[in-house]
Image: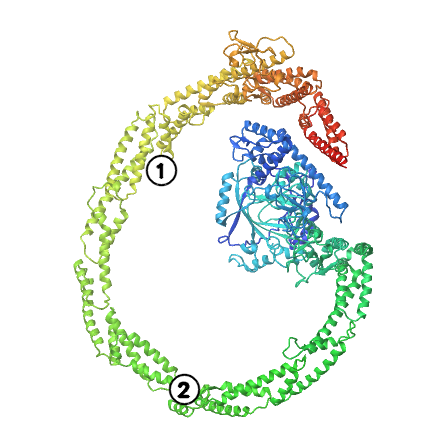
Amino acid sequence: MGKGRPRAVETGQNSGVSLTGSLSIPSGPVYYPSDEEFRDPLEYIYKIRPEAEPYGICKIVPPQNWNPPFALNLDSFAFPTKTQAIHQLQARPASCDSNTFELEYNRFLEGHYGKKLKKRVVFEGEELDLCKLFNAVRRYGGYDKVLKDKKWGEVFRFVRSRKKISECAKHVLCQLYREHLYDYEGYYKRLNQQRVKSCKRGIYEEAKSENKVKVSSSKRRRKNSDHEKVKLCKVEEEQLDQICEQCRSGLHGELMLLCDRCNKGWHIYCLSPPLKQVPPGNWYCFECLNSDKDTFGFVPGKRFTLDGFRRLADRAKKKWFGTACASRVQIEKKFWEIVEGSAGEVEVMYGSDLDTSVYGSGFPRVNDQRPESVELKKWDEYCRSPWNLNNLPKLKGSMLRAVHHNITGVMVPWLYVGMLFSAFCWHFEDHCFYSMNYLHWGEPKCWYSVPGNEGGAFEKVMRDCLPDLFDAQPDLLFQLVTMLNPSVLRENGVPVYSVLQEPGNFVITFPRSYHGGFNLGLNCAEAVNFAPADWLPHGGFGAELYQLYHKAAVLSHEELLCVVAKGDWDHKASAYLRKELVRIYTKERTWRERLWKSGITRSSPMSPRKSPEFVGTEEDPTCIICKQYLYLSAVVCHCRPSAFVCLEHWEHLCECKSMKLRLLYRHTLAELADLVLIVDKHASEEIPQSDGLQRNISCSNELNASKKKVKGAHVSHAQLAEQWLSRSCKILQSPFSGDAYANLLKEAEQFLWAGSEMDSVRDAVKNLIEARKWAQGIRDCLSKIENWSPGGVFEKVPLKRVKKLLCVNPVPCNEPGHLKLKDCAEEASLLVQDIDAALSKCSKINELELLHSRASSSPIHVKQSEKLSQKMSLAKVWVDSARKVISDKRPAAIEVDILYKLKSEILELQVQVQEAEMIFDLVSLAESCQDRCRSVLNASITLKDVEVLLHEMESFSVNIPELRLLKQYDIDVALWVRRFNDIMTNVHLREDQQNVIDELNRILEDGQSLKIQVDELPLVKIELKKAFCREKALKARDTKMALEFLQHLLSEAVVLQIESEELFLSLSRGLTGALKWEERANDILARKAEMSEFEDLIRISEDIHAIMPSLGDVKAAISVAKSWLNNGKPFLDSDFSVSPAFCSLLKLEDLKELVSQSKFLKITLEQQSMLETVLEKCMEWQHDAYSLLQDVKCLYGVTDIGDGRSNGLISKIEHLVNLLESAIKDGLSLRLDFPEIPKLQDACSALHWCNKVLSFCYLSPSYEDVESLTDITEHLSMLHSSGNLLSSLAFGAKWLKNVSEVIFAPGKCKACKLTDAEEMLAEYQGISISFPLMVAQLADAICKHRLWQEQVHQFFSLEVGERLWSQLLQLKEHGKASFFTCEELDMVLSEVEKVEKWKERCMDAVASFTGDDKSLLCALQKIRESLDRSLYVYEKSQGSEVAFLCMCCTNVSEDWDILTCSACKDCYHLQCLGYKNHAEQVYVCSYCQLLVGGSILHNGVGVLRHNGKYSDLKLLSELVSADENFCVRIEERYILLQIVDQAYACKKCLTEIVDYDMHYYDENLFSSISKKLAAALKATGLAGVYDHQSYCDLERALARYSWRFQVARLLDALDKGLEKPSIQQIQQHLKEGEAMNILPEDHFRLKLSELLDIGLQWADRAKKVAADSGALGLDGVYELITEGESLPVCLTEELEVSYHIFIQNEYVSSFLKYNLLFC
């Protein structure tokens, strides 16, 4: 397809669906947008949505030029992880609490069987958790389905997850479940069906009586005690005995459920999801149902750096797939094997849900630091990109633009760092949002998706496949911890699609689309939610789902709709926005009407938002029941001021009457309708729908027609509003009454929330509120004016407020105090005019005080009085300050700024005072002084001028800044002169001349900065130069200096006239000695003297305190000479006693270098000639070694090899080897690293190897000898690449190895083909070396194998019946001993393996019959004999004449004594029965005892003797039908065929007996069936083959017989008058018979039913008599008792009640007779 279109879109089987992975899951669509289409992500998704949404998912591959940089720093990035147990995502047991299950199970046993589970059930030596076993069987469909599908292995993994299961364990587990839990499973299913029916009935009843409070079976609470009845719970207002664990309220006790274990309470409407009524049976809370230890979730793991996580991921992948590259099919198959629990326990780490605002985003962001490797232009481009997930939720067209706060994971992306098998489980997004996932880098990510419209089918399959998990956690799909194989979903009709996301790809999931998947390796992805306009209806669905499950929402859907509708939105959103607004409008209207009809008339608006243009700026309250945000409306009550509920749960808030509840609303219905109409108005293309929309909104007028009962009459909402409007008009004309207004406004609350039809009411309410506020303001002002007094509790009334009230025109209501307040306001206005006049001119202080007194005595506060008070206070403060200044005569005590401030303040105040003139005079004097000081400062300052001025102004009281500055200058000069004089004292004797320099520098710097000129400044500079010279002299005295430096220093001292100081005289003496040493050193260096002269010169230099230029050259000459001696010492050492192998070799090049260096030494040494002699010896040895290597090279070129002896080749090799070893020894003794030594050693090794190869021409080597030769062949070929001798011998050695592998080591090496051996013989002809012994052995092996092949062909040419198993085994042994492989050997081994595997399976099947010899044939013969005896029993029971057989063994010897059963005439050996002598009494076998006692005696005879160890008939049948194409005759198979035929014959006989037992009804046949069952029991016990179905049928038949036997004994005792059965006994027998499927027409069941009817009829009559309070006479009661005693049923309890009534009646009768006689 072209750009922007999907590569492949799967729409069905006929469209060429491409299946992905090993699961055959169809692929989701893939899109490739063009650059133009890629500009706007929301527009592009809107374009592809109709095509992609049916898949629930799609992949988008960006254009090639879109390549965003990864913004995270991989070196410093660290993140937390979660541990995922992949093997438990599906195959995990529910977190059930075994104690709760045991409690419920015991209640079941006691209620149905009258007993409890006394013993612990043991399985494989450990206690069996019945709870886990029950849930595991439920997981796989129940007992019958598990048995049919053979799922006991999977069930076992839930019970014993860490153990392996055997076939025997499966069988035992099945029997344990059948014995203990099968009946409970049926009870549990019936109970669930009742709950479903009651739930449907509850929904119907709720719809039928919507506005009625149900007081039926749901008004129940349960107590945690065995067999206690459910009691009614009536909660009194004064005492709440139980509170709900969810809403923490004890109200609505009739709707409270109590857990039957912990006794905690929950309202049925507080559960998640809520219940409609109390469920039947016992009920347990989720805390008691679930066990904390089995609770499953992703626990926090370690914190990793990316490098550490990469190492962990690499190890995991290597563990599963090695170093090879695993395909997606392999990984996907292994993942689902792990999930389904068949691959062991697997835990992985997943860095999931990482908040990018904390850990950083993979996309560039404006505030993030840009990496240096990324260009600024590219960084800015991707920061602004709309496909950047940080920008996507806020794009134009996204509904989330209105959200104010950043919601992590929704508005703020989350980062995911995954590894192999890390998974994200089935879920859909919060609020059904869209989601976009981008894979930054790494291995692919595999996605699965179910379309949103198939969500219901998906959830149904999940619940059916994992029923136990959903029972434990009904909100399981909200937990994101469960996976289910997509193949299972597809098998159940749920469409599933797959997408493989690769790096750089986007994956989009659509609203309500369930999706999940896993990672194929280490990767990093980032995801965020977004919400285009088409999401809005899905968001409404999500909000309803949260409300149903009582889950807290991320944001308020209603708030988002209202904010978006008020803001800026595009035309695409209009249709969806309008539809959602109409929905919430209809919902609000319906519930507000319902509340009004229920009596909730009080209402008030919610407080307005500070920022209504954004969502989430303020936290809304949430419903205490469903946890949803209450944005549009809520219900509250004064009894619980902190509790809020939504309109749907208003009945569950409290138990107060509805009139006490209050409706809170944010928008009236009229405002909501206006929002809808505004949206509809902008949608110009949707005009045809506007009329329908208007009609829909106008339906709110139905409220006006709906009526409710008010004071005995039915009135409508509109009628109530009209009545209220009439009263409001009247009240405005009457004199104002606050109570009347308040009552009327309170009554109006029931109208204000409604639609536009109540606009007139809202207007009237607004007028009433304004009138009440105005009238109350008038009254309040008058009250304060009349009651005000100075110093009283009442405040003054502001004149501004009075004028505001009086300017209202016309007056809103009739308030008489209006005119009186007007008079008071006029008086206050006159006072304001007087104050303004006084403030506008320069007044005297006493005039202002008079006005202030008038304002203080007025009850009305005027604002101008504050200005007047302020002016008077400031004037008084100023006078006090001025007086203080004038009275202070201290020198410089007054700051000049204070004078200026006082002057400006008095000018601003405009108040007439005496002190003002005195302040003005003081200011003039200060200004005069300032002028004089400035003139001095501006000119060149001399010390004399400054002192004169300071003397004149010494006593002036004003502090002038310029005068103060001159005083400071004078002080500075005096201090500077004193410091200079201190320094000059004994300055030439000081040792710290550096300190002198520093002090003089500071003095000089400070003197130059003085503002007054001083005469001592030039002297400072001269002294500074002398100090520098003395400092250098001190350094020269303490430290060696160069001769030139000393000479310059002494000349400088002469210039400064300080050369006569002792310091400079000592320096002059040292300079003279240094010059003499320098002259001698130059002479020694020039004539190459001995080492002693140089050392003497060094000693003299140590006493000279100066640096000599030639001292370095002298020391360098000595150092070079000593270094040369040190390097040459190893070569001059004469100790050669140490072996060269134990010391390091010296380098020849170093020796040559030392000889060369000796010519350039400046000192004469004797070791020079010694080294030259050593070098000459080394050169001679190298020449000899070179000659030997040439001889070896000539030997390598020999072409005539032969056998090595005849041509003398071996002797030449040996001679040359001796010479080489001698030369090597001589070279090593010199202890130099000659390059020729390794070459000589290699040549010596090669010649040794050649000699050994040639020795095999006369000997037959072993395989180890040949193998040791070939190990070094490659090494020799690399060292000596040329030479005929070595190449020929290497070729011969290789041939020897190939032959020796065939002849000597066929077990160690892989056998070769016969053709390969023949090729070896042919190859020998081209070898130039003779190996006659090896050639003969190879030819003999080939001949023997040819003969064996002929034997194999002869064997397979025979008929199958003629081929013996022993012959085939013999051929196998001979063939395996051969050296070669061939087709005949493969065929023989294959046939032998096939037969042996079949025999192994047979041995496993008949393992209980094998003896010590482990013979299959003997075991099969034993089974056949046991079946013969079993058939004998069946034939005998049918009346056939059969030979004598013992019922316990197969011995037919006549020597053994026998004992015959007197009942069945069967024979038994005395030895088999354990008797030593004949029994004196008549013997009856254990089987025939069934005729007498109804049960089999457990004496170790018959079927009980084998302890259940039989061979399975089904398995034997499979063995017979399997592998019928054997190539040989197998005796065991023919015997097995006979056994299977006999077993089916026995099964047929048993089936006939069981069918006969099942369908007989006549009591006369009881004896006959007992004999047949005894025979079947014998035959089953004797047979060595076991058939599960037949055994179960026999067990049921025996159970039916036992039941009939017990009933017959009961009836017989009744007929003989021995004992009457009780009603309870009869009911128990009938219940058991019904469970055993005994037919209703059965004789014994009919008899019991008749007895039960007789007993129940009499019992009913007795109950009526007991309840009639003595209505029946004494005779009647006596007659009833007599009749009850004569019944064939024991009615002990009922008769006791009747006796009690009889005695009471007799007592009353006697009492009446006595009273009559007394009268």
Q: Secondary structure at mark 2?
A: helix
Using the image as rendered, state which of residue 789 and residue 1009 is in the foreground.
789
Q: Amino acid at mark 2?
A: Lys
Percent x, y for residue 1075?
Answer: 20, 70
Question: In the rendered image of this protein, does residue 625 appear above or below residue 784?
Answer: above
Image check: 874 left or right of 1036? right
Percent x, y for residue 1523?
Answer: 57, 21
Image check: 1305 left or right of 211? left
Give the numbered dot on residue 967: 2
Q: Secondary structure at mark 1?
A: helix
Look at mark 1 in the image and give the residue it sits on: 1279
Would residue 145 be visible to someone looking at this image? no
Front tag of 2 and 1: 2
Q: Quadrant of residue 223?
A: top right
Percent x, y for residue 1099?
Answer: 18, 63
Using the image as rendered, state which of residue 959 and residue 1317 is in the foreground.
959
Q: Amino acid at mark 1?
A: Leu
Using the image as rendered, state which of residue 876 and residue 921 is in the foreground.
876
User: Residue drawn 74% across and 45% down?
Assistant: 206
Using the image as rendered, state which of residue 1279 and residue 645 is in the foreground.
645
